[in-house]
């Protein structure tokens, strides 16, 4: 909990899909236990979320009675980090890492934790370098691990496989040939993501699993970017390529895992 998020406090660019800029939050005022009576960030929930089956209703909707900090039917509202607290005036969940400069839900579907899964598919290249599959995101052109959101009622293991298929195997027909790869995953991380979509009341958490191709199963598979990406390529772990959100940290974990 000593972690201080950075990417979700960027005041230089508008929040995704809006013209809204975050309130500047200095490092020393990130944690909620640091009193800051002047802190009154703008409240923003993207209007496109309204009526979406995968999104929560407004927090003030009297029919919305979620089970917080728990598995709520098919929706996991428990955090990997801790039992999160609530804003006493709005009853909104509070980001356990601290202030972000923006209240509301932003573009995230759930109040509180929004769970994702990130598969890191890796290999040793012909010239002996550890590398991984990355996609270039369509929304901001940054390179990223091809992951995505866990659907309601879905197991993380299913999400990992589905998301890689959608994001990196667009058009690949013989997907069954990779079943052996999906059976040898190694979990690298489970927790908070410093994601630019995060707000004071909604945030990203993920499970990161490495699927390392030791048998050359991908050698004859032509990977292709899905609809949410503009490009796909193998990136060497020592390339220093800037990556989306906390993905650089995940690649550091990948390097450490294979060094060990």
Image (cartoon, rainbow, N blue to C red):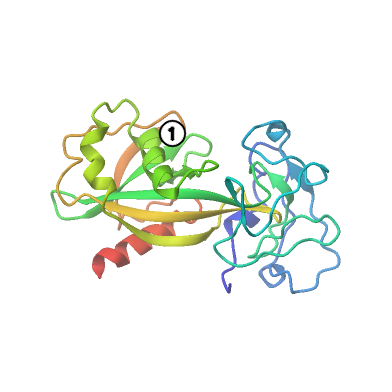
Q: Position of residue 255 (x, y in %)?
A: 30, 63
Q: Position of residue 78 (x, y in %)?
A: 60, 58
* Residue in the picture at 54% in, 50% down: 115
Judging depth in this view, the residue of 173 and 25 nearest the camera is: 173
Residue 44 sits in quarter: top right
Q: Name the residue furthest front.
A: 73
Quadrant in which the C terminus is drawn: bottom left
Q: Is residue 40 left or right of residue 67?
A: right
Residue 167 sits in quarter: top left
Q: Residues within 10 Å of mark 1 (few under 14, many from 20)?
A: many
Judging depth in this view, the residue of 75 and 93 nearest the camera is: 75
Residue 110, above or below 3:
above
Q: Secondary structure at mark 1?
A: strand
Q: Is residue 178 left or right of residue 161?
A: left
Q: Position of residue 86 (x, y in %)?
A: 76, 61
Q: Is residue 40 visible?
A: yes
Q: Is residue 146 visible?
A: no
* Residue in the picture at 72% in, 59% down: 24
- Residue bearing mark 1: 229
Quadrant in which the N terminus is drawn: bottom right
């Amino acid at each position: 909990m000593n972690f201080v998020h950075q990417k979700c406090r960027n005041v230089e660019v508008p929040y995704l899909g809006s013209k809204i800029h975050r309130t500047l939050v200095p490092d020393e005022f990130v944690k909620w236990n640091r009193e800051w009576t002047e802190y009154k960030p703008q409240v923003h929930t993207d209007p496109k979320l309204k009526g979406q089956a995968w999104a929560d209703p407004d927090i003030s909707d009297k029919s919305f009675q979620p089970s917080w900090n728990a598995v709520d039917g098919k929706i996991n509202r428990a955090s990997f980090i801790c039992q999160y607290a609530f804003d006493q005036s709005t009853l909104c969940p509070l980001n356990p890492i601290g202030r972000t400069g923006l209240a509301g839900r932003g573009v995230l579907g759930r109040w509180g934790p929004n769970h994702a899964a990130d598969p890191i598919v890796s290999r040793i290249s012909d010239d002996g370098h550890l590398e991984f599959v990355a996609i270039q995101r369509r929304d901001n052109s940054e390179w990223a691990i091809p992951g995505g959101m866990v659907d309601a009622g879905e197991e993380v293991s299913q999400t990992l496989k589905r998301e890689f298929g959608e994001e990196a195997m667009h058009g690949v027909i013989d997907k069954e040939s990779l079943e052996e790869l999906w059976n040898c995953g190694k979990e690298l991380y489970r927790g908070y993501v410093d994601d630019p979509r995060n707000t004071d009341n909604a945030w990203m958490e993920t499970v990161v699993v490495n699927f390392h191709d030791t048998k050359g199963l991908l050698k004859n598979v032509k990977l292709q970017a899905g609809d949410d990406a503009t490009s796909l390529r193998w990136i060497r772990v020592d390339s220093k390529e800037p990556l989306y959100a906390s993905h650089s940290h995940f690649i550091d974990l990948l390097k450490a895992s294979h060094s060990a």
